[in-house]
Each structure stands twice: as structure tokens, then as C-alpha cells.
Amino acid sequence: MMMDALTLDQFHVFVAVVEAGSFSEAGRRLNRAQSAITYAIQKLEEQVETELFDRTVYRPALSPSGLALLPQARRILDDVGRFRIQAREIKRGLETGLHLSLGALVPVGLLAPALAAFADAYPSVRLRIGIQPFSLDVRDSAGSREPADIHVVFGMLLPDTMVKRVIGAITLIDVAAPSHPLALAGPLGAETLRDHLQIVLTEGTKAPADQEIGVAAANTWRVTDLAAKHALLLAGIGWGRLPDALVADDLAAGRLVHLPTEDWNDNGALRHITLVAAYRRDEPLGPAGRWLLARLGGDADTQPPVS
Amino acid sequence: MMMDALTLDQFHVFVAVVEAGSFSEAGRRLNRAQSAITYAIQKLEEQVETELFDRTVYRPALSPSGLALLPQARRILDDVGRFRIQAREIKRGLETGLHLSLGALVPVGLLAPALAAFADAYPSVRLRIGIQPFSLDVRDSAGSREPADIHVVFGMLLPDTMVKRVIGAITLIDVAAPSHPLALAGPLGAETLRDHLQIVLTEGTKAPADQEIGVAAANTWRVTDLAAKHALLLAGIGWGRLPDALVADDLAAGRLVHLPTEDWNDNGALRHITLVAAYRRDEPLGPAGRWLLARLGGDADTQPPVS
DNA sequence: GATCCCCATCGGATCTGACGATGATGATGG
DNA sequence: CCATCATCATCGTCAGATCCGATGGGGATC
């Protein structure tokens, strides 16, 4: 059949002839007889119904039509080349997609440069980013809806089934609106905090566990969304803990105040927190995952992907 | 030979199978036996060295690799489609390039919308724009270095060998810097103007013709570049005639003043001038040229090119 | 004018890619 | 649970597409 009869090979021959300057030379470069080159060009011209080369001059010269069509032909061949590269990378184990899971309190701005570099280095890998509402850790990736390849969360309490790498540190502070009763108080001990409504991030449907991390108050409201928590705090509904980077503007503008809380419930490990990227030990990362992990870890110039 | 062995047909079959949902259905749609489909897919998988479909499930399902490669395959086919379209248009007589010649005093801003629309409508036609330094007309396109397809110049004195179309009108005014002696004078007759240096646009090497158009002064400086003329006038070197649109800002800011010249050398035809687009009668325009001419002439919604 | 290189053409060898039949397997329905 | 239908892989076969090598005409070069 092949009534279509445009062939990649014809495009190859076409640009080869243009680059070689003659049919014979093109044949030599392509390891084919000159008659095969003539044949291929004839077929292509037959398809296009236009002369691509002017044979009246000694060395065949591109006709205006040929000149106009040449870039498009090159473009097609480039695309095919990219197809080949992508296929080879997939065969070598490159992920076709990468699933990233971020803790809700992780400042995305910290990760953005690495992610931008990733998009540049692995354009063919679809990155999906999920937000893990549970505030402080991912005890088990089985707890989330679908297994992620890389988790970026706060660095404590990750199970040993995960391989961790520290990628940064952030500071959490307790804040409330200036209108909140706690805003005027002095140093705040656990007893005082207990008496005021705390806004806590939580997983959607999960019932509160027996012992929870980072909860000081007797009464808590649960929100699954960071923006919602932020809004509630701004509205003066209660107090809560947020990354300092997130509330810097609010503190400067006086929309929130920093509560001088004493350590409660822990030894301060929940104030200054390391950010880690982790993946399951039993699901090793592919090239793109390893690259991103290294980049997140600060290896600024990890080797680019093979091309 | 064909060690390359990636075939456009394989890509066709690939996306056909994806769209049809099964090998058999794809075969039906492509008017080919099912075995041919299987063969083509096998060949493609052999090239890619990866399974593209998962055959363990009943209807073959795209493998992750297949899913990742599918967009690239589609892209290639799209490019080939564009190649076909372009080839067909060329065969129908579409120009592969269009040469536009503008008089130096023609305000390009007036033409820009039409040119932008052209770039959009005929992306494959290379537009080349040359500036014709000679100020007021193009007596004969033979005078310029290479023949242009379309000339946009002031509308008088074009020879009858050219087909003209009025595309607008502009006003020329005489200006000088405020520091110039003429700036203070009242109505300026030809006698007064004659005594002051005039800045005139001219063709590069050509010796001044015996009778010139738009020259009033006894002494003139010749510049080939509009920007140079503009700069000389701003510097107070002399006086000269420019399109009002070009000097509106300068007039408002007081960097130039409008000279109340009386008509000199003509009956005012050189003040209010029609802009024409023209082409040689013996070299008819192709589709793109006709389209652009119509658009320049104000036919806002000329029919788009056949695709 | 001799030589070299170029391209088109032709005949013959080769291999690709199409077809149709066959069999195995999953889905569907009574 | 069996009959039926659809799907896909495989195989043998064959036509035609494509390559090669040879040949000939015609410019370029000296």
C-alpha cells in the first residue's frame, strides 16, 4: 500500500544531498550507490510534485522549493532524533514519570531552583507533585494514596525503610494574630498554650492518633490545607506553628505576631528542623530520580543526563 | 540497507493503534490486514528495544514507555503533515519568499499590523524588507539593487509598468530645531528656504539628478539614512521634511519646530501624500503577495490561505 | 581534447512489507 | 459452563519496493 510514501529515508537523503553538495558525494557518505540517491530524490520529488534540485547547473542546486522545504525536513529529522534519544534513555531505565511528595509545611520556594533545573535536564520526564497534608512526617508512604518516588518532608521519624538525604533546614515558629490573647503574654509555657485553641494540619479523613506530634493544646481545629490554616491564624481564630519564611511578611506587617513559646512536648527538635528527601529502600530510583535527589541535596552541578 | 529502519509508517501505525484501541481495529481503519499491524508494531518495538504495548491484558494497553513516546511520535507526524501542506502550497504557486521594498520615509508602524498578520497567515514565506533611500518615489525598480516583489512608496511618479494600489496617506512637514534661524521666522517662501541648508535623503552613490523632487535649498546635505537625517535636524544642522508621525514626539517636546513653509516647487502634492503599494505588471504576484497587498490596502479580513 | 566528476537510466538481485490462514486466549452471553 | 466472538501472534507466500553495478551523456578543468 504505502500510498503515503513519504519516507524518513527520503528526508535523510534529501538533507544529505544538500550537505554533501552532490548526489554522488551523498551516496558515499551514506554508504549507498549513487543510483540509490537518485532514486530516493526522485521518489521524494514525485511525492512533493515539485523539483527539489535544479539539475541544469553542474552541481545540483537547491530549487527555491527545495530551499523552502529544507528547514521543515530538518525539523522532522531532528524530531526523530529526539525520539531515538528518548527511547534509548527509557531503555536504560530512565523514568517516564516521577512522583514527588512534599510535606505541607515544606517551603516550595526552597525546592524551586532544583525543580526548574530538573525540567530543563529531563524534559521528557513528567513530574507530578503531591502535597502531604500530615504536618510533620511521612511515617509510611503506604499511608498516602499512591506511592511517591521521592518524599520531601521534615527529617525525624522517617522509618528505616527509607533512604534519607538532608537537603536543608527551616525554622518553625508559633504565631497568632495580634488580636489574640496570647499575643500580649510573656513567655508561654505548655500550661498556658494548653488553654488556647490550636490550629493543626492533619490528614483528611484520618481520626486523630492517640499521641500526636506537635500538638500542645487541649482543643484543636484540624485543617487539611496550609492556606486554610494560614487564613485562620490571620483571622485570629487560634494559634499555630508555621515555617518562618512563610510568615515573614505577616510578621513585618504586623498581621501576625511571634509567640515566645517555651519548648513544649519535645526538646526543641520541632523548632529547628532538617528537611530531608527520602525514597523507599526497596524501590531504587532511576537516573532522573537520582539526579533530582542530588540536586536537591545541593550538588549544584550534577552531571547532565546522557544524550 | 535501511539500518535506520525507523519508518514514518511505523509511527502512523503506532498512533493508529493507540487511537483505535486494538490492532485489529487499527488494521481496519488503515485498510490493512491485522498481521501487517502486528508486524509494524513489532518492527517499531524492535527499533526502540522496548515493549510499546502490554499484551498480557486483553486489549493491548500502552506501556509506560509507549505512553512516554507517544507525544513525540505524534509530533513527528504533525511535522510531516506540515511538510505536506507546505509542499502542496508551493506546488500551487505560493511564493517561497517575498521581497518588500519600502521608501525610507514610509512610516513602518503603519504597515506593521498587516505584516504581523502576514507572518501569521504565511509562516513559511520568508519576508525580506529593504529600505529604498531615495526619498519620494521609485521611478523604476530596475534602479534598485534587486527587484522587489512589492514596493511601498509615495504615490506619484510611479511608471505605468507598475500596478498600484493606494494603501494610505501621510502628511509631510518641514521641521528644524528651535535653535535654527528659520524657527523664528514667519511664513517661509521659496526664496527664504533657498538660503538655508536642507537635509535631503538620497540614494547612496547616485549623483544628484538635474531636477530633483522636494529640494528647495541651494545648498543641501545628502544622507542615505533616515535616522541620520533625523539626528542632523535635531542637532540644528539644517531643515528638512519628515512625516508628521515621525516627529510628533519631538514637536511636543520642543526638540523640533514646525516651519510654516509655503508651498515650494509644487502645488502642495508633496505635503499630503498617498502611500501606494505597487508591483511590476510583468511579474504578477503569487498568492502570498496578493494576500499581503490586499491586507495593506485595508481589506481586513482577506481569506486565509488554503491549508 | 583528455580526463574527471556528475547524474540518469536500466537490468537484475534482494529484501521489505503485505496478505490470508491458523491457532491460542480472553471476553461475552445464554 | 459452554458456545461464540474478538483479539493477537505466527507462518508461508508473494508482489513490489529498493538497492546495486554498469552504462552513457554531459558539464568542468586543465
Image (cartoon, coloured by chain):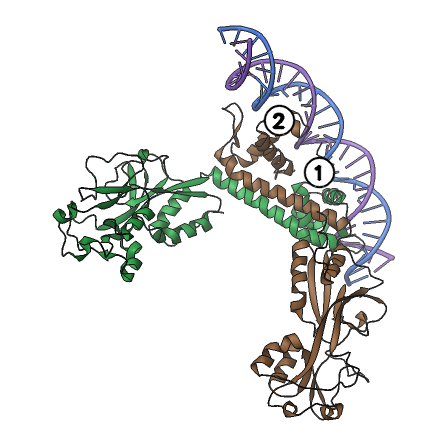
Chain colours: A green, B brown, C purple, D blue
Eyeballing the image, is D1 above or below B56? above
Q: Residues within 10 Å of mark 2 (few under 14, many from 20)?
A: some
Viewer-proximal residue among B73 and A53 = B73
Which residue type does callout 2 highlight?
Answer: Glu
Horizontal side of residue A288 vs A246, given as left or right: right
Q: Position of residue A146 (x, y in %)?
A: 37, 35
Viewer-proximal residue among A10 and B204 = B204
Quarter of the view holding residue B207: bottom right
Mark-to-mark CA distance, 1 and 2: 22 Å
One can see residue A206 in this view: yes
> Do circles 1 and 2 both sit on a common chain?
no
Quarter of the view holding residue B127: bottom right
Chain designation of label 1? A
Which residue type does callout 1 highlight?
Answer: Ala
Eyeballing the image, is A170 above or below B170? above
Viewer-proximal residue among A156 and A216 = A216
Quarter of the view holding residue B105: bottom right
**Residue topped by disc 1:** A5
